[in-house]
Image (cartoon, helix red, strand yellow):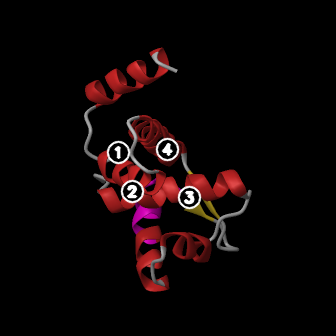
Amino acid sequence: MALKESGEMYLETIYILNKKSNTVRSIDVGEYMGYSKPSVSRAMGLLKNGGYINIDRDGFITLTDAGMEIAKKLFERHTVLSNILITLGVDEKTATEDACRIEHVISEKSFNAMKKHLEKNI
């Protein structure tokens, strides 16, 4: 199953929430993202069927290895891109919002070049 941007955002959200708490449920994802329960429920079903998450009988969500790989990659992209934009003088709110959009479309080659540049200039 090819993952779309919205699916990637759900995985990244699960990853972020899991860093804050060891337990993540659909309701937590919905609250964090500001999405309705039916939207989140449908997305969780698609992610589960795609092999990106597991949901236990109590409703707790965990990322599979495939889901974790994607979520970590997106989280790193988001963090690096936000930091670059902030370093360039963009306010934090705008930088974070723009990084969220850019992280899904930037090529690996361009991202790695930006990451290398940021690391070199810190």
In this image, 16 relative to 114: left or right? right
Residue 113, horizontal then vertical, whole percent = 32, 21
Q: Which residue is mark 1?
A: 103
CB contact under 8 Å: marks 3 and 2: no
Q: Secondary structure at mark 4?
A: helix
Alpha carbon distance from label 3 to label 4: 11 Å
Q: Secondary structure at mark 2?
A: helix
Alpha carbon distance from label 3 to label 1: 16 Å
State yes or no: residue 3 in magenta: no
Q: Amino acid at mark 1?
A: Glu
Alpha carbon distance from label 1 to label 4: 9 Å
Height in image: 92 above or below 107? below
Which residues, given as a range, are shown in magenta?
Answer: 45-53
Residue at 44 percent across and 84 percent down: it is 38
In this image, 106 relative to 15: left or right? left
Q: Which residue is mark 3?
A: 14
Q: Which residue is mark 2?
A: 97
The image quarter containing residue 111 is top left
Residue 100, horizontal then vertical, whole percent = 38, 52
Q: Earlier in the sequence, mark 3 or mark 1?
A: 3
Q: Secondary structure at mark 1?
A: loop
